[in-house]
Amino acid sequence: MGDGPAVTGSSGRPSHPGSLETAVAAVAAELPPVHAARLAHLLAASTGPHDRSDCLAAVPTLVFVGAVDQIFEAWARDQPDFSGAAVALALRSASSATARERDLQRIELVWTGPTTAWVPVRQTSAVLVEVINAARRRLTILSFAAYRVDSVLSALQAAADRSVDLRLVLETEADSAGALTVDARHAFSALGDKVQFWVWPGESRVAAGGGHAVLHAKAAVADEDLALVSSANLTGRGLDGNVELGLLVRGGPVVTQLARHLQSLMSSGVFVAVDRG
């Protein structure tokens, strides 16, 4: 059996999942630039696809060792006649292209919970405060539940003091299908009129199958530059205690698209501003 259906690589020719081209692209995307450069330097000096010992010892991490194995196995199987210099050039080119793409948009895992060697813990509360602190013009936050979290309140207060337009889209007790006993906005009462609250009116909600829809999204968007999309509610347990997973997106089209989508929902009346009082 083959390696699976072919896909078209950047060269325009079919590129199979086990090909050297695919392996080089995957390694370039996975390794930090400094490690990719180190591996390319060693590949250039390699005598062939069975000469990997120096590379394996270069950076003692699971990710780097896995990258070395991936390159050398694909090299031996797919293009055994290629020189080490040719493979090194391919990796340098792919790493350079990946770095340029990352400059436009970078995505980071945000994980609260038990740590492993693969993903370090980044408390969701700290990342949310980072997003709030980054806002200069507008900050939009969505959440289902919310309770007072002092670090978040302090960051929001500071944002208000620098004249950031603060917009919180939150679920209400009445529209939560019994899940909330108070409106989520009460967690931010200390901010007074420095924040504008928005809701998704219950009469506008249509759920698939006729069930009751709730406002369940959790996100924070600073201007059109930085966005956190997370499973965590704006509660102490959600931000610091539970196992929660999110993505922090820096720059690029996704943040712009999300920011403008939320703005459109507000300007079109899907989300409705409520009395600040």
Image (cartoon, rainbow, N blue to C red):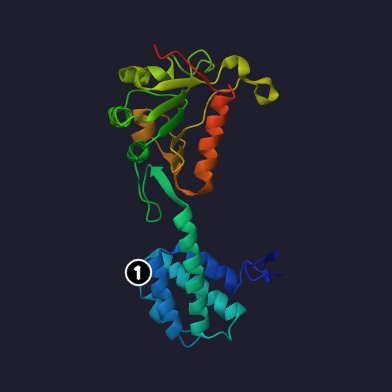
* The quarter of the displayed image where residue 114 is located: top left
**Residue type of the residue flagged with mark 1:** Pro
Quadrant in the rendering for residue 9: bottom right
Q: Position of residue 138 (x, y in %)?
A: 42, 33
Q: Residue at x 41, y 80 (%)?
A: 42
Against 177, residue 229 (above or below) is below
User: Mark 1: few, some, or many residues within 10 Å (few <14, many ≥20)?
Assistant: few
Which residue shows up at 42% across the image and 21% down it? Answer: 196
Q: For this view, does 264 lie left or right of residue 116?
A: right
Q: Nearer the viewer, residue 162 or 185?
A: 162
Q: Quadrant of the N terminus?
A: bottom right
Q: Quadrant of the C terminus?
A: top left
Check disc 1 and report the residue beneath it: 60
Q: Position of residue 181 (x, y in %)?
A: 44, 14
- Residue 262 vs 43, above or below: the answer is above
Give 24 or 60, whichever is nearer the viewer: 24
* Residue 192: image location, x then y, percent: 33, 17
Q: Is residue 141 visible?
A: yes
Q: Regarding mark 1 in the picture, which secondary structure is present there?
A: loop
* Residue 209: percent from left, percent from top: 69, 24
